[in-house]
Amino acid sequence: MKQIILALSLLATGPQLLQAQKITSGTYKSDNELWSVSIEVKENGDLSVMAGGKEEIYQQTGAKTFCSTAPNKIKFCFDVISEIRIYAYPDDGREGAYYNFAEAPAAPTDIDTDCPISQKYMDKVDDLDDAGQVWAYCGYAAMLACTSSPGETLNTLLQQMAVNVKLIYKGATCPCSDAIPASIWNQ
């Protein structure tokens, strides 16, 4: 789900198909508000999707479905539920997530200055293979630690990041203990 989680692209089948199922350009946030993607509708009907610092082009493959194949050959898709709601998922049987239109994309922040641990892991994300997904989760966990107040909410978010890393990473110890503390990893 790593930004996943979340990289989205669309197969251009023509403007007439896009008109059949419109989507609003802008930032979409997952229902649990852990993930966000920016979607821009291109003139040719393709969708440019920014997730985890990576851009993917999604092309329309059905009346309401858009897909892209990531460099690791995992096919990512999303179904357009309405002009402001989508369901994003990997096409390998794993569960996806619903996203709702939030607003126009926010200005980027300088995470290199504010969150150097996050930047360290995000710099390791070369593509969306398993290792890239692990580093993206680690980077996101570090960003959460940099930008959130300590407490139960932050711990819950870090626990969710640890669960996601464990789904991909098969090692016994946390690959990013400076982002996900051992006390959370070992739960």
Image (cartoon, rainbow, N blue to C red):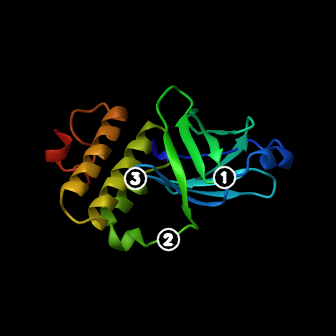
**Sequence-wise first label, 3 or 1:** 3
Mark 1 is on which residue type? Glu
Is residue 178 visible in the rendered structure shown here? no
**Residue in the foreground of this view, choosing between 133 and 85:** 85
The residue that mark 1 highlights is 83
Query: How far from the left and from the top, in percent, is residue 46?
Result: 74, 50
The x and y percentages for residue 84 are 61, 54
Marks 3/2: CA distance? 17 Å
Do the residues under discs 1 and 2 have CB atoms within 8 angstroms? no
Q: What residue is shown with label 3?
A: 34
Q: CB under 8 Å between callouts 3 and 2?
A: no
Which percent across, then down, holds residue 144?
31, 59
The amino acid beneath tag 3 is Leu
Q: Nearer the viewer, mark 3 or mark 2?
A: 3
Q: Amino acid at mark 2?
A: Pro
Q: Mark 2 highlights which residue? A: 108
Q: Secondary structure at mark 1?
A: loop
Which SS class for mark 3?
loop
Looking at the image, residue 13 sits to the left or right of residue 118; the answer is: right
- In what element is the residue under mark 2? loop
Query: Which quadrant would the N terminus be assigned to in this image?
Result: top left
Q: Position of residue 149 (x, y in %)?
A: 23, 66
Mark 1 closeness class: few <14, some 14–19, many ≥20 residues within 10 Å: few
Few, some or many residues within 10 Å of mark 3 (<14, 14–19, 20+): few
Residue at the image point whose x is 35% and y is 33% from the top: 167
